[in-house]
Amino acid sequence: KAGVTQTPRYLIKTRGQQVTLSCSPISGHRSVSWYQQTPGQGLQFLFEYFSETQRNKGNFPGRFSGRQFSNSRSEMNVSTLELGDSALYLCASSFLAQDNEQFFGPGTRLTVL
Amino acid sequence: KQEVTQIPAALSVPEGENLVLNCSFTDSAIYNLQWFRQDPGKGLTSLLLIQSSQREQTSGRLNASLDKSSGRSTLYIAASQPGDSATYLCAVKWTNTGANSKLTFGKGITLSVRP
């Protein structure tokens, strides 16, 4: 069974640009969550999607948005990039939202210059 | 505020040593707790998931325990090997987050096992 996949693996952007990251969950998983990981703040929850609906959102500005498609694949978008958005963005999937083990993808390393 | 703490931030041990990694959390109303491993620049690998009703889980040389009343979980690694060198993260899902998957992570413990 294939794991969680994320594309692209690496991205370099400049301030002010926007970026879209993609996540394909494990087959059959309906919940997809996104996290930002930085050396200073650690792993912070961005948002979670379940059956194409956003179920929860972390404390991030509106520049961060996401969506989920009918096949459970998810995308997150960051507009008007800032230097502080440089981070590893991780996606996690689980079968059901509540008590199931969460599986993470390899991440997308975003560098903002 | 619901927080997860992992101390110390780094640990170095000789190969073969049995070791315990600690995780503490501020609110005992947890739904489950998950331990992950992260290699440098990589994603997270799930090691063990402990539901609120469980006291421990085992997988190979790993054993994780949960004590909700004291707000603690420990990850026990038996007979450590250089390949165990990585950062170990503890993550909690609290009951008041409802029917969603939000995890709150500790900052992790970077483990180095010396040959």
Image: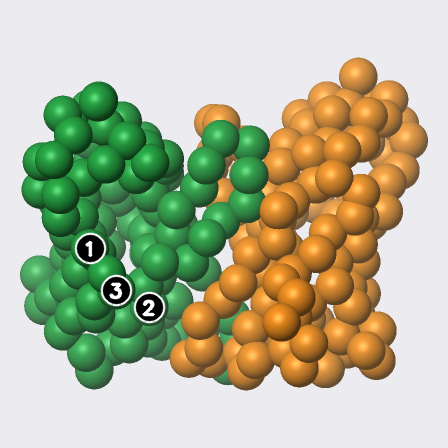
Q: CA distance from mark 1 to mark 2?
A: 15 Å
Chain letter of the residue beneath label 1 in the structure image: B
The image quadrant that residue B2 belongs to is bottom left
Decide: marks 3, 2 in contact (CB < 8 A)?
no
Chain letter of the residue beneath label 3 in the structure image: B
Residue for badge 3: B59
For the residues tagged 1 and 3, is the chain the same? yes
Chain letter of the residue beneath label 2 in the structure image: B
Secondary structure of the residue carrying tag 2 is: strand
Q: Amino acid at mark 2?
A: Leu
Q: CA distance from mark 3 to mark 2?
A: 10 Å
Give residue B49's mark.
2
Q: Is residue A32 visible?
A: no
Rendered location of residue A84, percent (x, y)? 67, 26
For the residues tagged 1 and 2, is the chain the same? yes
Q: How packed is label 3: few (under 14 Cα within 10 Å), some, or many (20 or more)?
A: few
Secondary structure of the residue carrying tag 3 is: strand
Which is nearer the N-term, disc 1 or disc 2?
A: 2
Which colour denotes chain B? green
Residue drawn at x 22%, y 22% is: B114
Q: Quadrant of the C terminus of chain A?
A: top right
Decide: marks 1, 3 in contact (CB < 8 A)?
no
Give residue B61's mark.
1
Q: Residue A64, relative to residue B83: is it above or below?
A: below
Is A76 left, or right, of A105 in this rendering? right
The image quadrant that residue A26 belongs to is bottom right
Rendered location of residue B80, percent (x, y)? 18, 39
The image quadrant that residue A66 belongs to is bottom right
Secondary structure of the residue carrying tag 1 is: loop
Q: CA distance from mark 1 to mark 3?
A: 6 Å
| Chosen colour scheme | by chain
